Amino acid sequence: MMLMSIFVFVPLKKHECDKLFRIIFILTFAASILYLIQCFTGQAILPMSKFQEEEGGVEAIGGVYRFLFTPAFMTVLIPISIFCKKLVPKQLRYISPIVFLAGRFCTLYRTAIATSLLCILLVMFFKGSFTKMFKAAAVLLVIYLVFGNAFSERLAKGNNSTANDISALMRGDFNQARSDVSNGLTLMYRIGWVIERGAYLITSPVELLMGLPMTSDAKFWHRNYDFRFGLRDKETGYIDQANTPDISYGMMMTRYGLIGTFFLLRMCYMMMKRLYMHRGDNELALALFCLLLSGFVGAIAGTSLSDPYAWTNTYFLYIYVMKMIEYDRERIKYSRL
């Protein structure tokens, strides 16, 4: 169902994609403004932010409040707002990159921010345009001047430093992984999550190929599995045995097994191959290709590759690119008649 859901967008005409993209862009811009207001005032405005405030509270670092649920299209619109100016509403062409990037920095997620910066660098590399490089660098400089202190405090906070995480990874010191992240090494925790479930799946060939059972019955999970790494439910005290919001590679293994993961990664490869072919004649194709490529880095700290809902943005933008290419071909064809 995840692979087939791309066909939801196939019947759309090119002009319908144009309208839908414009609506999405404007709504995402407005939602991102509200998100930034939240992060500076600490007052929840968006629905999911209110949920976070009620459930676990909001952490403040360096004067920035960490609201974890961002507007759905905000991340993918970062490179598009910088490099695909023809698609951006004229009134928002200069301010939208700053707003979207500022929203990304407000999350204070280290890997997520690095992934967005990597995507921008990849687009600049393929375009080879000094003008675009200067504009992107100027936007990044403005964002860093505003959020530099908060981000630096986030990196150095307690033992939860990027340096310690990377150092342990480079040494192969996986014994530092803690199921409760008591030492602050979140990357080691993610690796521990994957290793623990991988060790079990090797002993269960059917689940290795097909993934763990698809059920939301908590009693079933805790009757049949006893994994220590995972998020703990505050009400029941149970550790989530099958799901995690922290790493796509582990989720692909437990949710889809080797067979499902093969088809998922093959789908990624085929989409990226086609986008790469059109990188020179379509700016959105290049931006989406770089988003997918950098997404493999972001997958170590999120579920962008494994969750079906996360693919909605990619599916729509991919179909939009294909409609653009088809439209351009037809226009050239008729102009020659």
Image (cartoon, rainbow, N blue to C red):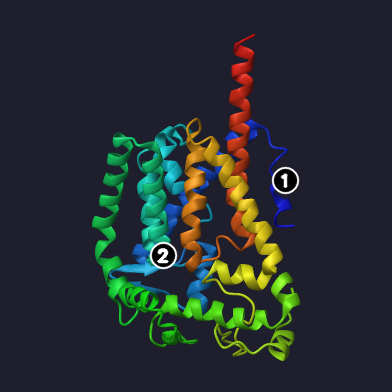
Residue 271, image x, y percentages: 60, 46
Residue 219, image x, y percentages: 73, 87
Front one among 41 and 255: 255
Q: Label 2 sits on what residue type?
A: Thr
Residue 207, image x, y percentages: 72, 76
Kindly report the distance in space between the C-alpha atoms of the residues bearing marks 2 and 1: 31 Å
- Position of 20 relative to 246 (above/below): above
Residue holding disc 1: 7
Residue 36 in view: no
Which structural element holds mark 1? helix
Q: Give the left or right position of residue 152, taking residue 260 as reference.
A: left
Q: Residue at x 27, y 56 (%)?
A: 144
The quadrant of the picture occupied by the C terminus is top right
Which structural element holds mark 2? helix
The quadrant of the picture occupied by the N terminus is bottom right
- Position of 108 relative to 236 (above/below): above
Sequence-earlier tag: 2 or 1: 1
Front one among 212 and 217: 212
Hey, which quadrant is residue 63 in on the image?
Answer: bottom left
Q: Give the left or right position of residue 226, taking residue 179 as reference.
A: right
- Position of 144 relative to 8 (above/below): below
Q: Residue at x 34, y 63 (%)?
A: 40
Disc number for residue 111: 2
Question: Marks 2 and 1: CB-CB under 8 Å?
Answer: no
Hey, which quadrant is residue 158 in on the image?
Answer: bottom left
Q: Within 10 angstroms of label 2, few (less than 14), some, or many (20 or more) residues? A: some
Front one among 140 and 67: 140
Q: Label 1 sits on what residue type?
A: Phe
Residue 15, image x, y percentages: 62, 30
Q: Give the left or right position of residue 214, taking residue 168 as reference.
A: right
